[in-house]
Amino acid sequence: MGMTRKYWKGLDELKETPEFLKHRDQEFPRETQVEEFLSDERLAESSTARRDFLKFLGFSVAAATVAACEAPVTKAIPYVNKPENVTPGMPTWYASTFYDGNSYASILVKTREGRPIFIKGNKDHGITKGNVNPQIIGSVLGLYDSERLTSPMKGGKVSSWSSVDTDIKAALQDVKSKNGKIVMVSNSIISPTTMTVIEEFKSAVGANFEHIQYDAQSFAGIRQANLETFGEAFIPDYDFTKAKTIVSVGADFMSSWLMSTQYQAQYGENRNPDGEWMSKHFQFESVMSITGSNADERGTIKPSQQANVLAYLLKAFGVSVNGVSTTLSDQTRKVADSAIKSLKESRSASLVVCGSNNPAVQVLANKLNMVLGAYTTTINVNDKLNMFMSEDVKMAQFVKDVVAGKGADMVLFAGVNPVYTLANGAQFAEGLKKVKYSISFASHADETASHCKFICPDHHALEAWNDYNPKTSHYAVAQPTIRPLHNTAAMQESLLVWAKLASRGGKDSKVYYDRIAKNWEMYGFSTQTEYADWNTYWGMAIHNSCMDDDIPAATAPTFNEGALSGLSSKLPKEGALEVVLYQKAAIGTGNYANNPWMQEMPDPITKVTWDNYITMNPVSMKKDGYATTFDQENGLNMATVTVNGKSVTLPVYPTPGQAVGTVGIALGYGRGGNGEKIGKAAYQTKEYGGHVTDDKGNPMPIGANAFAFVGIENGTMSYSAEGKMAMVEGMYPIAATQIHHTVMGRHSIVRETTLDIYKNRDASAYNPKHMLETHHGPEEISEFDLWDAHPVEKIGHRWAMTIDLNSCYGCGSCLIACQSENNVPVVGKDEVRRGREMHWLRIDRYFSSDEEATIGTKADEDTFAYDKAEEAAENPKVVHMPMMCHHCN
């Protein structure tokens, strides 16, 4: 079968709109368009000299220069050999571990002159096999954030550790004497030693103590479903390497679902056409995701139809679930039938994953995996995931109590920001004022910390020791790569000091390090036989960053059939318009909203930078009167989305592949709505090309806070709901890096074919040789040279970069890695709109359809087949193609 697809980057290019044709042949089309949109005064305000970019970002290396003059801290071990003293110009690498409550990876940290400058994945050790994501790579910039708190705060004013320690010890004594209640709210803690410290603190203070684990993105629905079906609340280990058929129902497992950094590596192993076999991937989802863009076949569904898909698949295997509809659209049913065929062929070598946080939907996924026999191959219930322990019910009750003024006498916040991430965050903030003692370990005076009486800033991860147990069979260590830049302290040390179990150790403190080493000697080294002594074992653990236990064998659990009864009443109800909340690859849940690298990273699907928006299918937009092509001069139509009485107003972005009847809004935006100091990059400041201000002239947050739409259903957080949408007056300018580029008719840019053609035909069938027309007829381009060949025998080989295009899935990690390692500056929204983004490489995203019109030509209006193009726009195929800079040859 020949490939006749037309590749297009945006809907304006597909339809060859007048706006597209007007700017197509200009060398710098975006600059011309933005000049028409912005006044000269605005242009002058937003232009920033490259040498000044750090100053405008609010990031400084001054403190790092001082800290880097001395070794990081006790027992930091480089990953590769180096001289005893730092050699100027020569990098030193350290193996460590990254965990921020949302992402996990084994990493290598590059330092120069004692300063961390670059993070990459550790391919030699750890369960993530060298895979990272943009947030992990970009986290190094946060070390140098000038908005970080440099000392503890008391009552909103700078204080000292001695003063804060004295006051908090007295507060603990006061609570204890009155038999009061202490509540600690943290993100999911996967550090064994941190849990030990919390237990020591609990025992020492002797008060009524409760620890609640709470994640901004909850996966409690999986745990609840496993409790109902298998009798234990857990998240199993998934192994994509053994799955010949992968069915994902709303799970973006290559970007934001559970242990995505591990799944990326596993998924890639069997997507190689030269391997023994290739996995077949089916995706059913609402918003076009990174995972969905890589699927072999993709069906579009509303969130409320996830159960329909699973019930339809179960029915094909002889399982009927009373009350659960199996109705699907024609297009989705076609994909589902293809998935059934593949599942029946692969059986136990199959894997079904589901992104819903509704326990009833997850029960259906469990049943399908049980029928397939996946629990003995691709799913291991004995190697449990310890991440995402969010206790949604406990947290909801605590919030209700605090709002009512009776939640606790003392509350401690570690790694969480509930005032921002709760749907009723404003009410919670008011209730927090009634709590007698409140403490935050935040690095910034963020939405929650700014309402606390004490802020006791924790170290940045690159300054700190820690240990991790992300799943049953794996343990890891994080070591510091630089001395603390500021007067911060490890959260664990603070707890021990306040419990009178330790004394402050200062910048070179060994308090928490000693606790970690003691734990590893007691529970790790004592079980090992291959190491002669403790020092050898501990040194190797730090050098490699991790130690693996034996992986327990997979066994099939007993399925409780009673879990299938009464499911229909627990499933989400279908609405005319369903609002889907999702995470972007760069911003995540909002932890990186103040990171300019993340803000300027083009979204892998939309290619938009610096903004939040409403994703909507162009077919729906046209029907509802929204402009379906990107108007660079005037911007996008605005709309207000309302869910349960709460509203946000954002621009509407045409997104091919979005399920009709749904809209998507990314979480993580709208940070600092009350002027909290969380970093300039989170606001629409002039330095970043934003010009939206409030009534007092202060810059407004970028985007809107979609956490306002998160509800609680069946005891877990829900990230979709029925809503309403209405157009509002005004247009909004957006900065995108690709939507208005042209392929200029060069169809040879993307080469793709089927596995059958690749395996059974000559390469010329799918990758014909490039020919040059000459006076003597067509000849191979390889026969011609514009300059002399590189003299390898004289000066050696040149360095060059090659990429397996079949392995690129468009995540954007390489873009941030290049920006980090080469210190490439951000330029801000206005400059991106002019086409002046500084990224040294980019990843082009091509939509493809069966529309055969050649780019640059247009058939007669009366005969041109627009219907075909509209079908492709509704659910197109996607191809990601990285484009290297000249530096990479």
Image (cartoon, rainbow, N blue to C red):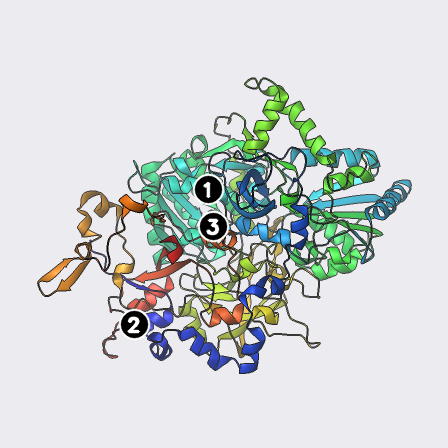
Secondary structure of residue under mark 1 = helix
Decide if residue 166 is on the left or right side of residue 274: right
**Crowdedness of circle 2 by 10 Å Cα count: few (<14), some, many (20+)?**
few
Look at label 2 and name its amino acid. Answer: Tyr
Look at label 1 and name its amino acid. Answer: Tyr
The residue that label 3 is drawn on is 252
* Residue under the point 54% across and 18% down: 530
* Residue under the point 43% across and 66% down: 617
Look at label 3 and name its amino acid. Answer: Asp
CB within 8 Å, label 3 to label 1: no
In the displayed image of the protein, which residue is found farthest to the front? 794
The residue that label 1 is drawn on is 263
* Residue under the point 44% across and 38% down: 369
* Foreground residue among 259 and 463: 463
- Callout in the foreground (2, 3): 3
Q: Quadrant of residue 479?
A: top right
Secondary structure of residue under mark 3 = loop
- CA separation, marks 3 and 1? 10 Å
- Callout in the foreground (3, 1): 1
Earlier sequence position, callout 3 versus callout 1: 3
CB within 8 Å, label 1 to label 2: no
Q: Position of residue 307 (x, y in %)?
A: 47, 50
The residue that label 2 is drawn on is 866
* Residue under the point 37% across and 64% down: 874
Q: Is residue 26 visible?
A: yes
- CA separation, marks 2 and 3? 31 Å
Q: Quadrant of residue 507?
A: top right
